[in-house]
C-alpha cells in the first residue's frame, strides 16, 4: 500500500481498506461505474454519508443562461450542464430502527474493491450501531456493458451475534440536493442546478416502480425504473409506493443470526427529446424485464466476458513498478467505461464520473481518447465520430453565423451547440475542427471501416476542409495563413499561425482530398469539384509554419519567441496560473499552459526532423507549467522520442496518477479521462514508439530504466498484434488477422505467423531541461 494514498497495490483491482470520511468525494469518483451511457458515482448504497451522489446519462443536460458583462454578436446565448438524474443506487438500511450510517457507531471492517476484470464494485463492511448491534454488509454493483440501459446491485445484510429486525428501503430519488463548490469558485467545476427535473409520472406495482421526469428548458425526458428480487430466511412485510420525486420499496423482516437478507436490485434508464412519457416508460419496463430474466449471475458473467475480450485487445503489461501497473490498468478501464456504449453520443471530459466542466466534451476526445479507442475498441471510436457527424448541421450553422464556410465545431458542448462563454479560449480554438478531421481519417485508416467513410467520414472531412479553406488565406508572398485563433495553449490566445493548428489543418486538407479520391460518388454528391480539391492541396502545400532561425526552434505561433519572459520564480507557489493571474498578463508572455508545439511533434511528427524535435523540446519544456491535465502525456511521448527516458517516465507517472493521487485537487468532481487515456499514449506511442502516418504503422520501442519489460496489444484493421519489449529487444506477434507491414526503428518487416524479434538501438544519454520552478513532474524515477 502506498502510505499516502490508502489503496492496496494490486495489478487488477483498486482496493480501499478502512474508513476515511474526508476521502469520500475522491473515492466516489475513483469507484464510479459506467458503460458510456449510464454513469453511477461510487457513493454508498445507504445514501449517506455522501459528497456528490451523481447519476448521469450520456447527453442528458439542462440549458442555462450564459452571463456576459458585455454581449457581442456570435456569443453563445445558453450553456448546457449535465443533470444528476434520478438516483437508483439508494438502498437504506435500518438496524432495529437505527439508520446505518458510517459516521455513527463503529466501523469494525470496511473495504471497497473496483475490479478491472469483472467490471464490478464490491464492498464489505462490518458495522456496529450506536446501540451495539453488529451487521455485516456485502454489496456488489455493475453497470452493464452488454445491456446499455441496465445497472444492478446485489445487497446482503447478515446479523452478527443475535436475531435482528432489519428494514431495507430501496429508492428511486429525483432532485437530490447537491452541495459543494461551484463554477463560481473554480471554472473547472459545474454550474449549480436546483430542482432540474419536473415530475411527469410515478407508478409502482409489486416489487417494481418507475419515475418519469423532464427538464424545464432543454425539454428532455428521462425515465428511471427499478425491480427487485428478495431472498429471505423468513417472512417479511413488503410495501411499495411512488409519488413525484420518490419511489420506495420497503422490506421489513426479522432475520435470524447466521442467515442473510439478500436484495437484488435491477435499475433501468432511458431518455429522449422526442419520445412520449408512455414510450419511455415502456422502454424502461422492457430493460428491467430483460435484466430480471437474465438474472444477477448471468449479468455478472456477461460483464466479465466483455472485459476478457477488451483486455485481449488492450492490455498493457509492465514489469518493474507494481503501482504503475495498477494505475495503467485503472486508466484503461475508466477510458473504456467512458466510451464503450455511448452510441452516437459525446464522450465528456469527465466521462460519466462527475459534473466537472458541466459534463462537456472538448477536443480532448478526438485528440486523446479516440487514439486509444481506435486501436483497442474501434467500434466505440466509430460511434463517437458518428455523433460528431450527427451534429454536422449545427457545426455548419455555427460557421455560417460567424460568416464562415463549411463546418465549425464547438469548443465545448453536450448536444453539438457551442456553449463556451469565453471567446479567446473557446470559439477561437478552431483547431477542434481539425482535431475531428484528424481523428476521422485516423479511424478510417486504422479500422478499414468503409461504411463509416461513405456515410459520415467524407462529409466530415469535406466540410472541415471547406471551413479552413475559407477561414485562412494566401498572403502576398503566396503563403497560406490562419490568423486570429488560439491553439492548444490557452495562455497564448488570439494569435496568428499557431503551428499545431496549421499542421492539423494541413493534414485535414490532405485527408479530405484522399477521401474524396477514394469515394468519388460521395464527393460528387457533396458538390466537390476538381478545382476545390486542387485548392485544398495548394492550401496544404503553402501552409505557414513559423520558425525562429536565430534560436533554431519553431515558434509556437508567429512571433511567440519575441514575447516577454514569464517570471516563474514569482509564480512558483501560485499554480494553476488561471486561478491566480489575469489572462491580460498571461497572454502577453512566454508561458505555456499545456503542451502545444510539443504535442504537434507527436501527432505530426513526420513534419519535424529529429534535431528539430530535440531543440523544440528543450525550448518549450522549461516554459510549460502543465496547468492542464492534458499536458504531461504529450510531453512524455516526445521526451521518450528524443531520449529523455527517465523524464518521460515521470511525466507518464503524472498523467496516470492525476486522479489516483488527486494531483489537481479536483478529482471529487470527476476523472480526467484524457489524462487516463494518456497512459495508453505514453506506453504505446512513448515507450513503444508507435506512429501511424498515412496508414503506415511504425514502432521505435525503448524502455526507461524503471521498467524491465512492457507489452501492449493493438487492433489494426482486422489484425490483432502484441508487442513485447525489454531493455535489449522487441518481439512482434500477430495474434490473428491478415499479415501487416510494419517498421522497427526504421527497419521495415512483414509480420505474419512467425514472431519477429529485433534489437533495440542504444540511445544517447542526455540531461533533460528543467521544468519551471514549482512545476517539476510527479517524480517516480528517483523512487
Image (cartoon, rainbow, N blue to C red):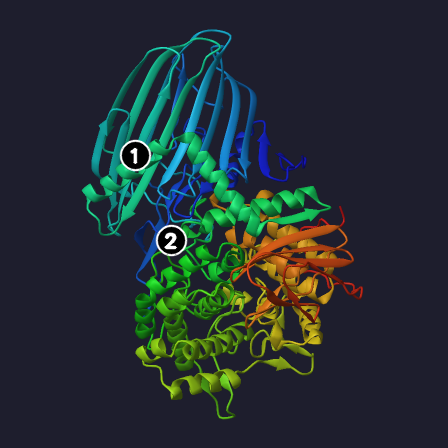
Q: Specify whether 386 is left or right of 124.
A: left
Residue occupying image coordinates x 43% and y 69%? 433
User: Can residue 233 be spotted in the picture?
Assistant: yes
Which is more toward the observer, 470 or 225?
Answer: 225
Using the rendered view, name the quadrant where residue 693 is placed: bottom right
Q: Is residue 528 above or below residue 361?
A: below
Residue occupying image coordinates x 36% and y 65%? 389
Q: Mark 1 points at which residue?
A: 289
Using the rendered view, name the quadrant where residue 101 is placed: top left
Q: Specify whether 518 is left or right of 551.
A: left
Q: What element carries label 2?
A: loop
Q: Mark 2 points at which residue?
A: 343
Residue 507 numbered tag: none
Which is more toward the observer, 550 or 69?
Answer: 550
Contact between marks 1 and 2 (CB within 8 A): the answer is no
Q: What element carries label 1?
A: helix
User: Can residue 405 be spotted in the picture?
Assistant: no
Identify the mark nearer the N-term, 1 or 2. 1
Q: Is residue 159 above or below residue 269?
A: above
Amino acid at each position: 500500500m502506498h502510505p499516502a494514498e490508502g489503496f492496496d497495490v494490486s495489478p487488477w483491482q483498486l482496493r480501499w481498506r478502512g474508513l476515511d470520511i474526508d476521502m469520500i468525494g475522491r473515492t466516489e469518483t475513483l469507484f464510479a461505474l459506467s458503460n458510456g451511457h449510464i454513469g453511477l458515482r461510487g457513493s454508498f448504497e445507504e445514501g449517506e454519508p455522501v459528497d456528490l451522489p451523481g447519476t448521469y446519462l450520456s447527453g442528458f443536460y439542462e440549458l442555462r443562461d450564459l452571463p456576459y458583462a458585455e454581449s457581442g454578436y456570435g456569443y453563445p446565448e445558453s450553456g448546457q450542464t449535465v443533470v444528476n438524474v434520478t438516483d437508483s443506487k439508494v438502498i437504506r438500511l435500518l438496524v432495529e430502527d437505527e439508520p446505518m450510517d458510517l459516521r455513527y457507531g463503529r466501523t469494525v471492517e470496511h473495504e471497497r474493491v473496483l475490479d478491472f476484470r469483472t467490471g464490478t464494485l464490491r464492498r464489505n463492511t462490518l458495522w456496529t450501531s450506536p446501540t451495539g448491534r453488529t451487521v455485516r454488509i456485502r454489496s456488489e454493483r455493475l453497470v452493464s456493458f452488454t445491456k446499455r440501459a441496465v445497472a444492478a446491485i446485489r445487497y446482503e445484510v447478515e446479523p452478527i451475534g443475535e436475531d435482528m429486525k432489519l428494514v431495507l428501503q430501496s429508492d428511486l430519488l429525483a432532485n437530490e440536493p447537491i452541495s459543494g463548490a461551484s463554477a463560481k469558485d473554480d471554472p473547472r467545476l459545474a454550474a449549480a442546478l436546483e430542482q432540474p427535473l419536473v415530475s411527469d409520472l410515478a407508478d409502482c406495482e409489486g416489487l417494481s416502480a418507475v419515475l418519469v421526469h423532464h427538464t424545464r428548458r432543454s425539454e428532455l425526458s428521462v425515465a428511471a425504473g427499478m425491480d427487485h428480487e428478495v431472498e429471505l430466511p423468513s417472512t417479511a412485510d413488503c410495501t411499495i409506493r411512488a409519488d413525484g420525486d420518490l419511489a420506495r420499496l420497503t422490506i421489513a423482516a426479522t432475520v435470524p443470526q447466521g442467515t442473510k437478507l439478500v436484495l437484488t436490485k435491477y435499475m433501468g434508464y432511458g431518455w429522449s427529446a422526442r419520445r412520449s412519457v408512455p414510450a419511455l416508460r415502456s422502454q424502461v419496463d422492457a430493460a428491467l424485464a430483460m435484466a430480471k430474466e437474465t438474472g444477477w449471475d448471468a449479468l455478472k458473467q456477461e460483464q466479465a466476458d466483455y472485459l476478457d475480450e477488451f483486455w485481449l485487445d488492450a492490455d498493457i503489461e509492465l514489469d518493474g513498478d507494481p503501482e504503475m501497473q495498477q494505475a495503467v490498468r485503472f486508466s484503461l478501464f475508466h477510458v473504456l467505461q467512458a466510451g464503450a456504449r455511448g452510441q452516437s453520443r459525446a464522450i465528456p471530459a469527465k466521462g460519466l464520473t462527475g459534473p466537472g466542466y458541466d459534463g462537456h466534451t472538448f477536443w480532448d476526445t478526438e485528440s486523446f481518447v479516440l487514439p486509444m479507442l481506435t486501436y483497442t475498441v474501434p467500434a466505440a471510436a466509430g460511434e463517437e465520430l458518428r455523433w460528431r457527424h450527427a451534429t454536422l448541421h449545427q457545426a455548419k450553422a455555427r460557421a455560417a453565423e460567424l460568416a464562415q464556410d463549411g463546418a465549425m465545431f464547438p469548443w465545448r458542448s453536450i448536444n453539438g451547440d457551442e456553449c463556451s462563454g469565453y471567446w479567446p479560449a473557446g470559439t477561437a480554438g478552431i483547431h477542434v475542427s481539425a482535431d475531428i478531421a484528424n481523428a476521422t481519417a485516423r479511424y478510417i485508416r486504422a479500422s478499414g471501416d468503409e461504411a463509416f467513410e461513405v456515410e459520415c467520414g467524407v462529409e466530415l472531412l469535406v466540410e472541415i476542409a471547406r471551413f479552413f479553406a475559407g477561414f485562412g488565406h494566401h498572403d502576398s508572398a503566396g503563403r497560406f495563413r490562419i490568423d486570429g485563433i488560439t491553439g492548444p495553449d490557452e495562455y497564448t490566445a488570439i494569435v496568428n499561425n499557431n503551428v499545431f493548428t496549421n499542421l492539423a489543418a494541413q493534414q485535414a486538407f490532405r485527408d479530405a482530398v484522399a477521401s474524396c479520391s477514394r469515394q468519388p460518388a460521395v464527393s460528387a454528391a457533396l458538390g466537390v469539384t476538381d478545382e476545390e480539391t486542387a485548392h485544398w492541396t495548394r492550401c496544404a502545400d503553402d501552409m505557414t509554419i513559423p520558425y525562429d532561425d536565430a534560436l533554431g526552434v519553431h515558434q509556437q505561433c508567429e512571433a511567440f519567441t519575441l514575447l516577454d519572459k514569464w517570471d516563474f520564480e514569482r509564480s512558483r507557489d501560485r499554480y494553476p496560473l488561471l486561478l491566480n493571474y489575469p489572462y491580460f498578463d498571461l497572454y502577453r508572455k512566454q508561458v505555456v499552459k499545456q503542451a502545444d508545439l510539443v504535442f504537434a511533434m507527436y501527432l505530426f511528427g513526420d513534419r519535424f526532423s529529429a534535431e528539430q524535435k530535440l531543440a523544440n523540446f528543450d525550448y518549450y519544456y522549461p516554459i510549460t507549467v502543465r496547468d492542464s491535465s492534458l499536458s504531461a502525456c504529450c510531453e512524455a511521448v516526445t521526451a521518450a522520442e528524443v531520449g529523455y527516458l527517465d523524464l518521460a517516465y515521470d511525466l507518464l507517472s503524472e498523467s496516470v496518477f492525476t486522479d489516483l493521487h488527486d494531483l489537481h485537487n479536483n478529482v471529487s468532481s470527476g476523472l480526467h479521462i484524457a489524462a487516463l487515456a494518456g497512459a495508453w499514449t505514453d506506453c504505446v506511442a512513448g515507450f513503444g514508439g508507435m506512429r501511424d502516418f498515412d496508414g503506415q504503422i511504425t514502432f521505435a520501442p525503448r524502455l526507461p530504466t524503471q521498467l524491465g519489460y512492457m507489452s501492449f496489444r493493438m487492433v489494426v484493421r482486422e489484425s490483432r498484434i502484441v508487442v513485447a519489449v525489454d531493455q535489449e529487444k522487441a518481439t512482434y506477434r500477430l495474434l490473428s488477422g491478415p499479415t501487416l507491414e510494419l517498421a522497427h526503428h526504421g527497419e521495415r518487416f512483414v509480420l505474419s505467423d512467425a514472431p519477429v524479434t529485433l534489437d533495440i538501438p542504444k540511445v544517447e544519454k542526455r540531461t533533460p531541461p528543467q521544468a519551471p520552478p514549482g512545476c517539476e513532474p510527479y517524480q517516480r524515477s528517483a523512487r
